[in-house]
Amino acid sequence: MKFLFDLFPVALFFATYKIARLWDGSLPLASRWLGPDITAAQAPILLATAVTIAATVTQIALLRLKKQKIGYMMWISLVLILVFGGATLFFHNPVFIKWKPTILYWLFGTVLFVSAVFFRRNLIRTMMADAGIVLPETIWSRLNLAWVCFFAVMGLMNLYVAYRFSEETWVDFKMFGGMGLMLAFALGQGFFLSKYLEKEPHDA
């Protein structure tokens, strides 16, 4: 359920963009609420960005009302969507929202790297502590480095698609490519860890 909750703004961005491209009323709506000088080509990405900002703010508000814990990743995502999404709406330029995933990926990778190298704290092990997984220290280090490299590559891939392909292709990649690669990497991590997990002895 948490995964679906986190995925909600991305799915809403995708759905809004696709609907706005097909709906004749997208330009009048965008012109009314986001500025009179918006073109038909700009309307879908601007409407999708505005809806995503609203959805992310609503998520945080609901969690606060329910007095549930809001993770650092969600706070960081909120700040980035407000800054880069807000810049996209203000300047009517989608380049800002296209950079947002890359900044998020690189920020996560940097935090993992800095925490491990300078503070001797492996955040991957910390995040997986509740699962009760016991691994050799060298394996935890490799796993942390693997995530650092993964986030670095994901950031580069996002920019490559954003600048080398059409806007619609980037939106498709954001929804399916990014999430698909994240899921595939997590599954690969599971297979990797299965070789090192300590097996508890059975009762005699």
Image (cartoon, rainbow, N blue to C red):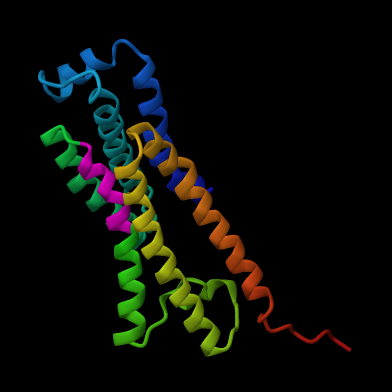
Is residue 193 positioned above or below 73 on the image? below
Which segment did they paint magenta? 94-104
Q: Residue 13: x percent and y percent? A: 36, 35
Q: Residue 97: x percent and y percent? A: 25, 43
- As drawn, the residue found furthest toward the front would be 164
- As drawn, the residue found furthest toward the top would be 24
Q: Is residue 75 visible?
A: no
Seen from the viewer's position, the closer of residues 69 and 94 is 94
Q: Residue 105: x percent and y percent? A: 34, 59
Q: Where does the C terminus fall, quadrant-wise?
A: bottom right
Q: Is residue 35 left or right of residue 137?
A: left
Is residue 75 positioned above or below 15 on the image? below
Q: How many marks?
A: 0
Seen from the viewer's position, the closer of residues 87 and 173 is 173
Q: Is residue 50 visible?
A: yes
Point 44% across, 76% down: residue: 145
Point 54% across, 48% down: residue: 1
Q: Quadrant of residue 57?
A: top left
Q: Is residue 89 left or right of residue 136?
A: left
Based on the picture, tell me whether residue 42 belongs to the magenta stretch.
Answer: no
Q: Quadrant of residue 37?
A: top left
Dominant SS of magenta comes to: helix
Is residue 96 positioned above or below 128 on the image? above
Q: Quadrant of residue 133?
A: bottom right
Point 11% across, 23% down: residue: 35
Q: Residue 121: x percent and y percent? A: 38, 83
Based on the picture, tell me whether residue 95 belongs to the magenta stretch.
Answer: yes
Seen from the viewer's position, the closer of residues 123 and 57 is 123
Q: Is residue 147 left or right of residue 109?
A: right
Point 16% across, 17% down: residue: 32
